[in-house]
Image (tube, rainbow, N blue to C red):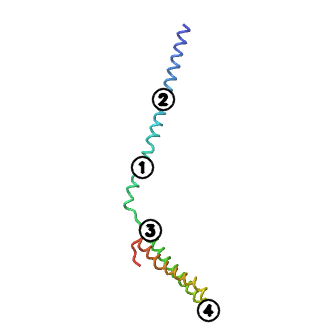
Amino acid sequence: MKTISNEIRAFRSSFRRNARSLTTSTTQRVRQTFRVIAPTLFALAFASVAHAQGSMDFSGATTLMGTFKTFAIYAGAVICFGGLIFAGIRMMSGRFQDAIPGLFGALFGAGVLGWGAGWIGSLTGQNM
């Protein structure tokens, strides 16, 4: 009798172990399935944001480029005017050779004033 009851107990305990492993296995399968599906769900959640890119408003960028254009105009004018003053003072004192860097500075300022502002305006479609 003892051997039969021991066999029954062993069978019952092995059945309980198998039942536990089945539930563990099921939870592991659910977790694994979620790990596989999660990136797809994450991408689909943001798909509506990707469709909205056709209606984006870039008026702020145009305003910002207009600010850069205004800065280029003022900076070019200040550089050009400063170079002319520097060269004029050197020329009035008779040091014509020292005035050459000031003239090149004025030329550089004129380039910033003309080409810089023109290039920035061409990027945004603005007129000079």
Q: Would you call the spot at circle 2 few (<14 residues within 10 Å), some (14-19), or many (20 or more)?
A: few
Residue at the outermost top position: 1
Residue at point 42% right, 52% down? 46
Check disc 1 and give the amino acid type: Ala
Q: Mark 2 points at which residue?
A: 23
Q: Name the residue under label 1.
A: 45
The correct choice, above or below, for 22 with respect to 31 in the image is above
Would you say 51 lies left or right of 98 here? Answer: left
Q: Mark 4 points at which residue?
A: 94
Determine the CA span between mark 1 and mark 2.
31 Å
Q: Are marks 3 and 1 in contact (CB under 8 Å)?
A: no
Determine the CA span between mark 3 and mark 1.
28 Å
Sooner in the amino-acid sequence: mark 4 or mark 2: 2
Q: Mark 3 points at which residue?
A: 61
Q: Would you call the spot at circle 3 few (<14 residues within 10 Å), some (14-19), or many (20 or more)?
A: few
Name the mark nearer the viewer: 3 or 2. 3
Residue at point 59% right, 90% down? 91
Q: What element carries label 1?
A: helix
The correct choice, above or below, for 72 with respect to 48 in the image is below
Sooner in the amino-acid sequence: mark 3 or mark 1: 1
Would you say 98 lies left or right of 75 here? Answer: right
Sooner in the amino-acid sequence: mark 4 or mark 1: 1
Q: Are marks 3 and 4 in contact (CB under 8 Å)?
A: no
Q: Is mark 2 on a helix, strand or loop?
A: helix
Check disc 3 and give the amino acid type: Ala
> Residue 108, percent across and down?
52, 79
> Residue 56, percent across and down?
40, 62
> Residue 115, percent across and down?
46, 77
